[in-house]
Image (spheres, rainbow, N blue to C red):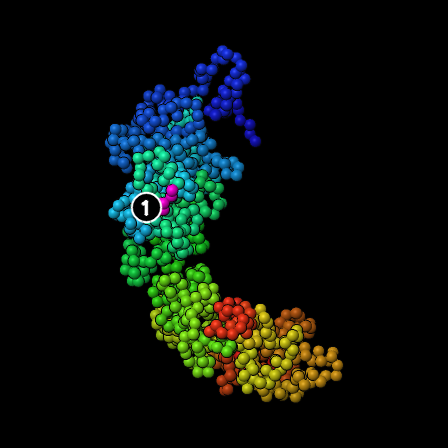
Amino acid sequence: MKIKPWNHYIRKPMFLVMLFVGVNLLNSCKDDYYYDDKEPEWLGASIYDYLKENGNYSYYVRLIEEVGYTEVLAKTGSKTLFVTNDESFERFFQKNEWNVTSYEELSITQKKLILKYGMLDNAYLIETLANYNSGGLQIGTAIRRSTSLSELDSIRFETGEQMPESEYWEYYRDKGIHLIDYTLSENAGTLPLVHFLQKPLENAGISDSDFELMTGVPREPGDAHIFKNKVIERDITCKNGYIHVLDNVLIPPTNIAEFLKGNNKTKIFSKLLERFCAPYYSEEVNLEYKETHPDFTDSLFLKGYFTSVNGPNTYPNGRRIVSDYLLTYNPGWNNYVNADGTTGGLQSDMAAILAPSDEAMDDYFNSGQGLILKQRYGTWEDIPDDIVALFLKRHMRESFIQTVPSRFSKMNDSENSPILVSSSDIVRSYIGVNGIVYETNAVYPPDDYISIYGPVLFSDDTKVFNWAIRRNDFRLYLNSLISRYSFFVPTDEFFNSYIEPVAYGKDVPGVIKFWFNPRTKAVNGTVYNYNIQTNEVGDSIAVITNAEFLSNRLLDLLNQHVVVGGVENGPGYYFTKGGNVLKIEGSDENIIVKGGGNIKLGTQCNTLQKYEQQNGYTYFIDRPIQTPLQSAYKILSETPEFSEFFKLLSGFSPSSKSAIFVKKANSSGIDYNIKFFNTFNYTVYVPTNAAILRAISDGIIPDWNQINNAADIDTQNALTIKLERFLRYHFQDNSVLIGSNPVAKLYQTATIKQTDDHSRFGTYPDKYYRLFVNSDGNNLTLSTESNESYGEKSAQVVIQQGLYNIMTRDYIFNNLPTTFREIDGSGNGTLFTSSSIFTSSTAVIHQIDNILRFE
């Protein structure tokens, strides 16, 4: 560490005071000590005496005297004072925001504001202003400092149009209300000032051009500024502190919320922000104020903006505020501290707001991307609060240091989406006590407005899906602008035919109608009897309010209603995000959608409205898409043409390692699941009964009679493994459908190669054998790994019987369906609403005219 010379410390008043006291103590036993009644001349004058004797600070001396701080600033102590000379005051009286033209016109309150806001309660050189303590000494990082001005020194009285236009203020609109800005402590705090010093600017990477754009004032290396006021004389040493001279009179700025409220250029944005605040009564703050103002008999209220951290998250009546209505932070909190705790406290950072001008707001609303808002709501005032909150949060920045102009190109919002701001967007800036306001000539809408989520967010007819999206944090997925999607959205009117999968295989099948409850702002479900054979819906039998259950089912639906890449290439088959297959018919605004369940039931989903968004298309449809309710096991077991293949599949002991069909307590489907299906999509090729019987007859594969009648256990085990490996070769990763785009590709099967023998497709040992699939869209041919022919080397999907493109879905529930009560509440077990869909695997089944061999 560099050792500083002795004369460095001589300039420190606190050191001088300590030295003086120490000498005095050492000599206290002497009755005639020289400095008992006289201070050393080398300590210099007090702050008050220096200003009075200088002759150039007569206005400031009058402030000190009339505010009652003569004694404080004339005695030994520890103060820092930012002052202005008489010449600066004369300029101030020519033009200022208070509209005073002489010293005599200043009120006593205004005098207090000037004096106490320019005063710090410790002695700081300009150099040491950059340091602060927060779990240790933080050197060269401070940009703010608490002053001697209490928030109670600047209360305001508001009535009528001065007050926010929301229900929380109506009671006070005519009678008026006394306000101070929100404080987190039991006592009112002090107003901070913002200083720009060389070392903190360097450490934060803030350039001189950044500073000029933010303040409108040029800066040179080494300059020091309080807000945009330059320090023209620094470190004047007095016996009780330091004096720093500013080039302009320092008037306390307001916080960023109050600036926006008073700025005639940002009225629209400010009115949106003011929706999210309310008056809060604090008995402690009222007692504190009345101690110094005993004549005050009214009540004083804190103005708080709704936020989850560092601000109120309940309404004045104590009711908790839903997260959708909470802002990023409290812009009315003067002592703002970044909520993530990484900035070290008040001193090291503050907030920022990108505030579009009224002109920019009007341009956005009446043209381009914002036009959808106007078409939906008519005016900014009529846009619902939850939608406005998304807009505001996009424009609210938690870190000033991360929002300086040189970092504009790297700025992302809280959801890591870029905010495309350029320096040319900035009309002007304002630095307040808790942050900076950039008035912009552009609007930065949230991705919610321009993504495929936008039409759902804005519509009154899609509240069910909107609730599900918010509840499951599905916004981030839908808002991704780097991908393209088609999003199918059942409108609320038609959200009445969801066939409940857990109940599908139980004694009381049911369908659920989802509906939005305006009182609770949540989705409820009404359960109806359902006839599986006739697809008829009967009487209502129950109402479900369990949000976890409803959210789980709707999340499953969301995953099946999004197609990555989109369906705009025309009719055909497309995969959803959840792995299910949709059949698309029609085109443009007349798209028809069918899931595997719709195809089975003979139903379809028709397009009601189509919206083109930045990352794809949103389609409002007239019913939920129904995915398959039949498992692969169900189809294989109940289709006569698949009976010989099913006999072989079902012969394994359910508890054996070779089992194909499984039913597990903690991962069960409607009936049995395919053991090696794993949250993916598959193809199952089922040889005709004749092909299976021929293979058995020719000794290619064993049947279960042959296995069970084997002479010894080793032979039996060997035959079982042979059959298992043969069967698994008919299960392929990835679903391939007839009617899709042409394909010529190798796909993995479920059989692992165990030898290093050469195979047709060069599969390595311990890797899965493969199939070559060749399809022109109308026919599908398979080539196998086998080097020897068995009849034909290839197999072909049988089109004539119609046993192809059969869609299945193997659900995974949190427990066996039999452990839950019936959907109407009857029976034994846990409540039906405790059931949950964990995941699923899907498969498409084709009949083929030959067996598949890998050996």
Q: What amino acid type should be assigned to the residue bearing mark 1?
A: Leu
Q: Which residue in the rendered view is the most extreme toward the right?
A: 712
Please state which of residues 355 and 21 is positioned toward the viewer in this rendering: 21
Q: Is residue 608 visible?
A: yes
Against 72, residue 769 (above or below) is below
Please state which of residues 747 and 715 is positioned toward the viewer in this rendering: 715
Against 568, residue 122 (above or below) is above
Please state which of residues 804 and 820 is positioned toward the viewer in this rendering: 820
Q: Is residue 740 visible?
A: no
Q: Is residue 499 left or right of residue 60?
A: right
The answer to whether residue 690 is magenta is no
Element type at mark 1? helix
Please state which of residues 222 and 399 is positioned toward the viewer in this rendering: 399
Q: Position of residue 77 (x, y in %)?
A: 44, 25
Picture quadrant of residue 666 = bottom right
Picture quadrant of residue 691 = bottom right
Q: Main secondary structure of the magenta part?
A: strand
Question: Where the C terminus falls, by quadrant?
Answer: bottom right
Residue at point 35% right, 69% down? 610
Q: Position of residue 251 (x, y in %)?
A: 33, 35
State which region is magenta.
Answer: 279-283
Within 10 Å of the Cα at label 1, are there few (<14), some (14-19), or many (20+) other Cα atoms? many
Q: Is residue 488 left or right of residue 359?
A: right
Residue position marked by numbered label 1 in the rendering: 260
